[in-house]
Image: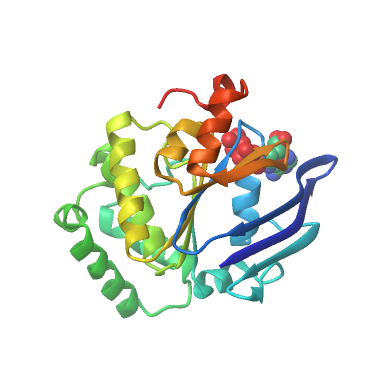
Amino acid sequence: MLEIKNLQVNYGPINALKEVTMTIEKNKINAIIGVNGAGKSTLLNTISGLVDPDQGEISYKGRQIQNIPVEKRVKLGIGHVMEGRRLFKDQSVHDNLLIGFYFRNPKEKRRNALLKINEIYKQFPILGNKQNQMAGTLSGGQQQILIISAALLSEPDLLLLDEPSLGLAPIIIDEVYQLLEELKSKGMTIIISEQMAALALRISDVGYILERGQVVKKGDRSYLKSLLDSDGLSSVYLGKA
Ligand code: ATP
């Protein structure tokens, strides 16, 4: 689905990613685990095209994409939910979806935008029922679903989510994770970044541990769990689940 080879990103003298190589498997939830500053956001931003790599290749469905613009990557099926809750709280739910749609598909006809938004309302009736309400009045979980829905409007096959649990109460994290599992059951491939391995591993099939821009460990959920439990990394990575 997605092959990353020897990816390197520098911000001036800072090496944010160093020779990152990974194979993201189709229809799985893949976790990128690392502490603050490990390079998680840089990696997701480089996959979606917001950051240009200094070196390396990214191929998606067999096609090299590292030099093509964000907009084209969206068209190829890459959706990205960036870090932090980026909602326009004083705009309605409907307008947030419109803004989200046009941010990703600036040249599309309005009719298509409305059709896609109606599909989202069918999928998430709570958003349809509250479409005229200000986004800031939704609960935390509903806001996160709204943010993810905006990315779903372009019908991605690969969805990147940067720390989707950040700042959310545990019960809301459950709601968001349930949504991600539903998306996976419909065939989507998902990459999430997480600081707390214990959280990520609750839903991930595969995980990569990133340290100072390098992949230091990778494996399936049970391998990573045993690794984190056994070698003393747990206090750094497990956090509270
Ligand atoms: P966080 O959880 O804080 O988002 P992260 O694992 O996502 O951390 P990145 O944000 O990718 O890590 O940062 C990786 C490194 O690159 C850090 O040292 C960070 O300070 C640096 N960095 C990130 N963005 C920039 C930028 N625009 N300019 C300069 N340095 C940056």
Q: Position of residue 3 (x, y in %)?
A: 65, 64
One can see residue 239 in this view:
yes
Could you tell whether 240 is left or right of 95 in the image?
A: right
The picture quadrant for ligand 1 comes to: top right
One can see residue 50 in this view:
no
Could you say which is closer to the camera, residue 122 or residue 115?
122
Could you say which is closer to the camera, residue 92 or residue 156?
156
Q: Residue at x 43, y 23 (%)?
A: 240
Could you tell whether 88 is left or right of 40 in the image?
A: left
Q: Residue at x 61, y 31 (%)?
A: 36
Q: Position of residue 233 (x, y in %)?
A: 61, 24
Q: Judge whether 29 appears above or below 78 on screen.
A: above
Q: Position of residue 219 (x, y in %)?
A: 58, 45
Q: Position of residue 195 (x, y in %)?
A: 54, 33
Q: Judge whether 138 appears above or below 28 on screen.
A: above
Q: Residue at x 67, y 72 (%)?
A: 68
